Amino acid sequence: MIKRYYKTTFTIYRQNWANESSSLQYVVGFKGHLQQASDEEIANLASIYTLTHKIWCGATIDVQAGDRLTDGTYSYTVKSVNKKDFAGRNKHLEIMAEKDLSFTSA
């Protein structure tokens, strides 16, 4: 099953607006699998000048395009979320995300 690959812990942050100002708010943490996207996937996203990854995680995770994911070392911006719920026991989300090379955590 695909869950055996979920070894990286991610945290989701979402832009939240209140009183005419915005801030990143914690949404949820989850386990997932990170791998570099293929050339074809990168071309489909039109993200030629960035480092694009795909992340697999459980099908019920609350993640949306525009969210910020962190893995404790790097930050990623979610570009698309594709629900793969047709695959029997391997139901999951496939998140396409761009790595933010200017961000690293201590």
Image (tube, rainbow, N blue to C red):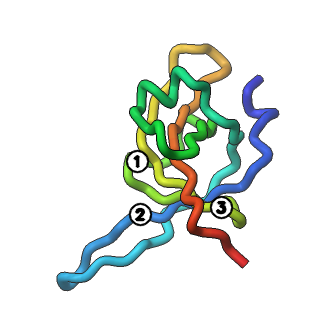
Residue shown at 46% from the left, 26% from the top: 43
Classify the position of the N terminus by image quarter: top right
54 sits left or right of 22 in the view: right
Distance from the alpha carbon under mark 1 to that under mark 2: 8 Å
Q: Earlier in the sequence, mark 1 or mark 2?
A: 2
Q: Secondary structure at mark 1?
A: loop
Residue shown at 48% from the left, 53% from the top: 77
Q: Is residue 78 above or below residue 23?
A: above
Instruction: Kindly identify which numbered label has been placed on residue 64.
Output: 1
Q: Tags 1 and 2 in contact by the CB under 8 Å rule?
A: yes
Classify the position of the C terminus by image quarter: bottom right
Residue shown at 40% from the left, 47% from the top: 64
Q: Is residue 75 above or below residue 41?
A: below
Q: Which residue is mark 3?
A: 74
- Out of 18 and 40, give the one closest to the viewer: 40
Q: Earlier in the sequence, mark 3 or mark 1?
A: 1
Label 3, residues with CA under 10 Å away: few <14, some 14-19, many ≥20:
some
Distance from the alpha carbon under mark 3 to that under mark 1: 18 Å
The three-letter amino acid code for the residue at tag 3 is: Tyr
**Where residue 73 sits: x, y (%)?**
71, 65
Tag in front: 2 or 3? 3
- Out of 11 and 70, give the one closest to the viewer: 70
- Out of 34 and 25, give the one closest to the viewer: 34
Q: Quadrant of residue 101?
A: bottom right
